[in-house]
Amino acid sequence: MLRTPRLCSPDNSVCSSVRTRGLSVTPQRLEYSEHNEDQKTTVTFLNREMGDMISVDGISQYGFHLNSGVVVLGPMAVFPRTVLGWNVPSAPHITPASLALFAILEPRLDCLVIGTGDRGTTVSKEVIAFLRQKKISFEILPTEQAAATFNFMNLERRCVAGALIPPVDVRLVDRDYEQHQKSQRQALLEEP
């Protein structure tokens, strides 16, 4: 089944149901300052520093939640300030033709981050040969790690792009599980 990418606003009921199922991918950066008198470590939340730049804040089986509140359904090609639907249903369907856009960009990319979906999924040798031939630096990672890598490189103001496919299996963190349990308890209380 092909997933058709689609953008929608956060107040759309379809999108809001996707957002609630997503895994929060909000990377944090620890900074240690030698000039700090207290010699304390500080934490900076990246998505608060992004400004008009795009970051991936959530991942679900259906798509991605961006820091702007936009939900992208299906695979996407993401750039520092732009996001496009990417018509590639799964990692085995990633071909040199599906990556051609990234080869013609100006200025040239510092890095293309490819999110293959789930752990253990990879791309063909043909794709790797294509990227090397076009002299495109790349990272091939499971989508959850690829989104965090894209966010971090984008915050560093590097010329980065992401080609991300939603994973089939999304890892839940304790916060997601607790939120699910709370919503189930609330639903039980509301039943007549």
Image: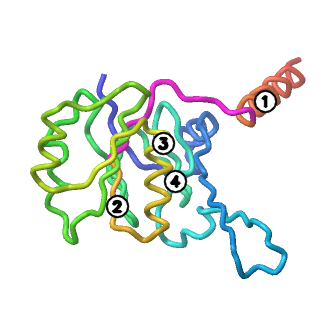
Residue mark closest to the camera, 3 vs 1: 3
- In front of the other: label 4 or label 1? 4
Regarding mark 4 in the picture, which secondary structure is present there? Answer: strand
Image height check: is 79 above or below 162?
A: below
Residue 172 numbered mark, or none: none
Query: Circle 4 sits on which residue?
Result: 66
Residue at (26% x, 63% y) in the render:
109
- Reading the image, the residue beneath label 1 is 183
At label 3, the amino acid type is Gln
**Nearer to the camera, 45 or 70:** 45
Cα separation, mark 2 vs mark 3, equals: 15 Å
Q: Is 172 on the left-hand or right-hand side of 40?
A: left
Question: Which is nearer the eye, 40 or 135?
Answer: 40
Q: Left or right of 151: which side holds 117?
A: left
Please state the horizontal and vertical placement of residue 75, each as a whole percent of the image: 36, 40
The kind of residue tagged 4 is Leu
Determine whether 185 is above or below 130 in the image. Answer: above
Q: Marks 1 and 2: which is nearer the front?
A: 2
**Mark seen at residue 160:** 2
Q: Earlier in the sequence, mark 4 or mark 2?
A: 4
Which residue lies under the disc numbered 3? Answer: 145
Q: Residue at x 59, y 62 (%)?
A: 47
